[in-house]
Amino acid sequence: MQKEIKPDDGIIVLKNLTKRFRKLVVLNDISLSFEKGKTTVIIGPSGCGKTVLIKHIIVLLRPGLGEVYFHDQRIDDLPESKLGKIRAQMGFLFQSGALFDSMTVSENIAFPIRQHQETQDQKKLDEIVKSKLSLVGLDGYQDYFPAKLSGGQKKRVALARAIALNPEVILYDEPTTGLDPIRADVINELILKLRKELGITSIVVTHDMNSAYKIADRIIMLHNGKVLLDGNADTFTNSTLPVVQQFIKGETSEKDLQSLQVSFEDIRTDEGKKK
């Protein structure tokens, strides 16, 4: 029997979370707690609800049923006017980076600081921007526009913006997608660095198992709206569940293979009959 999760079991707690879009149930009665200062990686096939789950944590989506807690406080039922202070404690790295193309790197990083009115003093803003860019290895790029940056550099600038307000938690949505293995590993190293140097709690959605094994203290696999497996890297490597092994090895299922067995000759024959 699964242990009942309480609001004070972690820095973030999801209790009996359910979300549906019309008739499609994306999250089905999920209960999870996330330990402060740890990195949790969420994996699973496309459409299994990974991104939907982390959007509930920052209340970009609200559950149909269930509750979301941050530091013992329920937040999913708060009005937008009270969510600003909560969100300021959580950085979000979008899959695309989501930089403002019309702003320089410096202006992008300063944007959340200005929005939350932490400071409007330009000298102080410049110091903060320099500090955050130094953390991601891009000090000196302040006056660049996003169009002049590589894909990896854009992700690093977006990460610098995500930590602009010194959040306790960072939510990563597919942080290594679209990057070559070397640039992807730079992001992995930065995730590890932020945990080690700043004690940041990280929740990472990814398909990249190399990344998952490198950065995760804990891995959670979602499947059909439920938590299929929850444990460390060894738990997944040693799992005998076919779905788990298929995913971590990147293997096509027998069902998918069968659907590919139709030969070009069969297609030509069918087209000939139609003529």
Image (spheres, grey):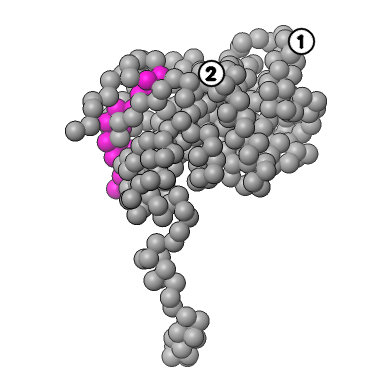
Front residue of 155 and 247: 247
Say few, some or many: other residues with alpha carbon within 10 Å of mark 1 (under 14 / 14 to 19 / 20 or more): few
Magenta run includes residue 28? yes
Q: Mark 1 or mark 2: name the one nearer the start of the chain.
A: 1
Q: Quadrant of residue 152?
A: top right
Do we see residue 22 in this rendering? Answer: no
Q: Quadrant of residue 75?
A: top left
Q: Secondary structure at mark 2?
A: loop
Three-letter code for the amino acid on which mark 1 is drawn: Lys
Q: Nearer the viewer, mark 1 or mark 2?
A: 2
Three-letter code for the amino acid on which mark 2 is drawn: Gly
Do we see residue 181 in this rendering? Answer: yes
Q: Which residue corresponds to the image point at 74% horizontal and 13% vertical from the top-left? A: 127
> Relative to residue 234, is residue 104 drawn left or right?
right
Q: Which residue corresponds to the image point at 35% horizontal and 46% vertical from the top-left? A: 239
Magenta run includes residue 110? no
Q: Which residue corresponds to the image point at 46% horizontal and 88% vertical from the top-left? A: 269
* Quarter containing the N terminus: top left
154 up-or-down from 57: above or below: below
Q: Which residue corresponds to the image point at 46% horizontal and 35% vertical from the top-left? A: 41
**Overall secondary structure of the magenta section:** strand
Q: Secondary structure at mark 1?
A: helix
Front residue of 246 and 86: 246
Q: Are marks 1 and 2 in contact (CB under 8 Å)?
A: no
Q: Which residues are drawn in magenta?
A: 10-29
267 up-or-down from 12: above or below: below
For disc 2, the marked residue is 199
Number of numbered discs: 2
**Residue 123 badge:** 1
Q: CA distance from mark 1 to mark 2?
A: 27 Å
